[in-house]
Amino acid sequence: MKKLLGACVPYVAKIRSLVAEITDPTLEAACYLLFSHALQSLYAGLMLASEGFNHQLIELIRGIREATDLAVLFMCEQEKGESLRRWFDGEIISNETARAAFEKFINEGRGEPLAVAVVKSGLYTGLSYFNHMSYVGLFESIDAFSRDFDVSRIAGLHFVAASSLPYAKGELQAVVVALKQFYRARGDESTYLELDLVLGLFGGFQTANPATY
């Protein structure tokens, strides 16, 4: 996972050269901040994972998902998008707004629309169980062997290895796909194609279409 993160860092850092001032209310500045935050959160997630802090890792994953979805939303709406302006004005842009915009983008020209927003909503709801302290999320903090709260984080280490870390890897892959979209929109075909090589490191298929994520 660290190797994958390391492979992604240069492509986020490269966006900085497109930003005159980091506080400029531009699409490039927003994407740079959001992608940087996502990668930093994934590094923090590895620290949590190594100690078995599963619940806390999933809370962090939802923030990574929100950062990536916001970047994609801003790219879908382009520089003059209303959401970008509101975000720089300090408003909170709901993930529902991002999901709806992404579904519209994906379904442009399709005869049979894909229910992308519904799928993404289900995934987001699953993550939210942990952020909102639902019993469903907190149940994973019970050690089935000691019949107690998972103070030793034995159950946490199990869930980290079985589900949360692979899920985090998927979120990183989604960041790479979003980065491809960013560079493609700017006509940077070379960087766009280089990111295919990064996707190849994940061991799955390579795609320029972020609908999968």
Image: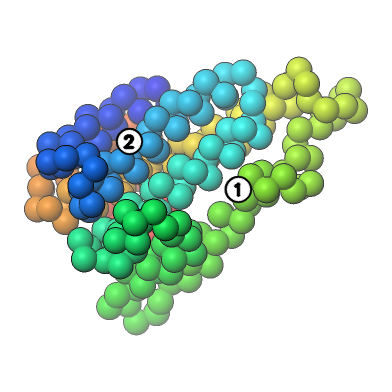
User: Going 79% across and 40% down the picture, which residue do you hit?
Assistant: 139
**Quadrant of res 157:** top right
Q: Which image quarter is the N terminus in?
A: top left
Residue 159 in view (yes/no): yes
What residue is disc 1 on? 127
**Quadrant of res 122:** bottom right
Residue farthest to the bottom, as pictured: 111
Residue farthest to the front, as pictured: 89
The image shows residue 7 at horizontal and vertical percentages of 28, 28
**Foreground disc of the pair 1, 2:** 2
What residue is disc 2 on? 36
- In the rendered structure, which amino acid carries the disc numbered 2? Ser
User: Going 24% across and 43% down the picture, which residue do you hit?
Assistant: 23
Q: Which of marks 2 and 1 precedes in the sequence? A: 2
Q: Secondary structure at mark 2?
A: helix
Total residue callouts: 2
User: Going 41% across and 47% down the picture, which residue do you hit?
Assistant: 67
Instruction: Choose between 115 and 44: the one closer to the eye.
Output: 44
Classed neighbour count for the residue bearing mark 1: other residues with Cα under 10 Å, few (<14), some (14–19), many (≥20):
many
The image shows residue 154 at horizontal and vertical percentages of 74, 21
User: Going 35% across and 61% down the picture, which residue do you hit?
Assistant: 86
Q: Which label belongs to residue 18?
A: none
Identify whether 165 is placed above or below 19. Answer: above
